[in-house]
Image (cartoon, rainbow, N blue to C red):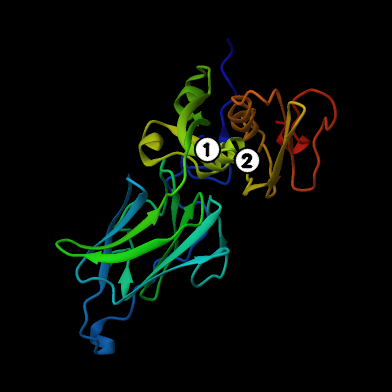
Amino acid sequence: MSRARPLAALAVPLMTATILAAPAAAAPVPAAVPIPSTARTGAARPVSTLVDIRAAHHRGLDRLVFEFRGPLPATRRASYVSSLIADGSGNRVQVAGDAILQVRFGHAVGHDSRGAGTYGPTRETYPLPGVIQVVNAGDFEGVLSFGVGLSRRTPYRMYTLTHPNRVVIDIKTPFRTVPVKTFLHNSRAYAAGREPYTVAVRRPVIPPATARGALQRLFAGPTRAEYARGLRFVNSKATGFSSLTVRDGVARVRLTGKITSGGSTYTIADQITPTLKQFPGIRWVKIYDRFGRTQHPTGRSDSIPSSLEP
């Protein structure tokens, strides 16, 4: 077997416009901006520094924990929003999920005096029933904000714990999920020219829209542990999908964003196609660009837009 053409987006650095190297910041957020020092403002209250974000499923809920060094943030707010907007820039931040819970901490930072992050990835994926992603939306002038991508909008409760100082959000999961597969890019196998170049990982989704749920989880990318194994989501500059329909064995997916192969033989289509074909009712997959174009819109065959050709 001949060695595959190198995937340009896998060259160092790993994070490019083609690879959504989650967990990492895939949407632009403002650079860390230190808040004014107490010497200049006369403020006596120490700043809260975020040192960890973690999430886990418990019976009937997903628990999201923000751990801080120093005092608890002076203000703590959470609310559902229709879209996530980055502090400072005003840019829209992409978050996977059917609901977005915005979380904001006042008089808090997520970086040290040199501007280096203190809590881990700014975009992290979780294989939980409710919580899909936690994405940073700003670390700007003493306000630290995040968007939590959820599979469904449900009630939640925010409270604090001490020793260590934590802000906890319990998000109810009053629904049944079923396991499905999401196919991610195996960057190590691709670099070695060793097929297959995709690896299946398991994700919980809410029935009956299991195909849509699997595709949504694909766009969330790998978890931190999966990323460490070399798994990636090759997004080909797609920002998401606007529609998915299935009829007569044909799945039709319309992508958003200015999609392009970037000259690579491996694209987002190589992940979408197996992710959808795992379902018995889908035999062919037709992928459309944002303008509704694909090379073979009719007939029983797979199809991709010309922009995804090498």
Count numbered badges in the picture: 2
Instruction: Please state which amino acid type lies under the numbered disc 1.
Output: Phe
Relative to the observer, which residue lies in front, 185 or 79? Answer: 79
Which residue is under mark 1? Answer: 233
Judging depth in this view, the residue of 66 and 257 nearest the camera is 66
User: Residue visible at 52% across and 38% down?
Assistant: 233
Local secondary structure at mark 2: loop
Label 2 belongs to which residue?
236
Nearer to me, 187 or 11: 187
In the rendered image, the vertical position of residue 203 relative to residue 249, given as above or below: below
Are dots 1 and 2 in contact, CB under 8 Å? no
* Residue 185, position as x, y percentages in the image: 52, 30
Looking at numbered disc 2 in the image, what kind of residue is underneath it?
Answer: Ser
Q: Residue at x 45, y 39 (%)?
A: 222
Rounded to the nearest angstrom, the CA distance separating label 1 from label 2 is: 9 Å
Pick the quarter of the image with the C terminus.
Answer: top right
Q: Provide the secondary structure element on which disc 1 rests.
A: strand
Quarter of the view holding residue 279: top right
At 68% from the left and 50% from the top, the residue drawn is: 257
> Where, by quadrant of the figure, is residue 162 drawn?
bottom left
* Residue 210 percent coordinates (x, y): 57, 36
Compared with 250, 212 (above or below) is below
